[in-house]
Image: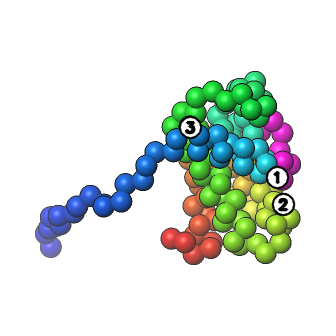
Amino acid sequence: MTLQYVATTAPDFVPEPITDAEAAALFRAAVNLFQLWEITDEEAATLLDQPVRTYRRWKAGHFGRFNRDCKARLSNLMGIHKALRILFREPQRAYRWVKADNEAFQDHSALEVMLGGELTDIMRVRRYLDAERGAW
């Protein structure tokens, strides 16, 4: 058996990058989400890969520049929130799920996984939830 070359083309749809204004809106939504998840400013800063001082300054409405990594983190966190709201009818169950031990994460919580600090840690939780809800 020999391998054959299959020609591919680039996708027609290329999403526009997230603007700083959109990132600021995502950040404000994330702050509200973090309150519902009952996480600390230190944990929130870790999720966004920002110093705690920067997170608190942004939380007070004094935004700096959102880099590409931070925008991706915010986008994935909103994707996690959306998936949880689809999976759970009761919002409180969705908010509690983030801190509950989960066999899929070797009996660690999704929050513990995400607090690993890497963008891929957040993406791992999002991929898991997307697969659970049948999105992929």
Q: Is residue 57 left or right of residue 15?
A: right
Residue sitting farthest toward the front = 21
Which residue is rendered at x = 62% and y = 58% of the image?
A: 79
For the N terminus, the quadrant is bottom left
Instruction: Evaluate if marks 1 and 2 touch, with contact meaning CB atoms under 8 Å apart.
Output: no
> Dot 3, crowdedness within 10 Å: few (<14), some or many (≥20)?
some
* Main SS category, magenta section: helix
Which residue is rendered at x = 79% and y = 75% of the image?
A: 89
Q: Between label 3 and label 2, give the one nearer the viewer.
A: 3
Specify which label sits upstream in the sequence, 3 or 1.
3
> What's under tag 3, amino acid-wise?
Asp
Specify which label sits upstream in the sequence, 1 or 2.
1
Q: Circle 2 sits on which residue?
A: 96
Q: Is residue 134 left or right of residue 16?
A: right
Give the structural element (helix, strand or loop) at label 3: helix
Q: CA distance from mark 1 to mark 2?
A: 7 Å
Magenta-colored span: 35-43
Q: Circle 3 sits on which residue?
A: 20
Q: Up-down: is 132 above or below 39?
A: below
Specify which label sits upstream in the sequence, 3 or 2.
3
Which residue is rendered at x = 84% and y = 53% of the image?
A: 36
Q: Is residue 108 visible?
A: no
Q: Up-down: is 75 above or below 4?
A: above
> What's under tag 2, amino acid-wise?
Arg
Residue 49: x percent and y percent? Answer: 64, 34
Q: Quadrant of residue 133?
A: bottom right
Give the structural element (helix, strand or loop) at label 1: helix
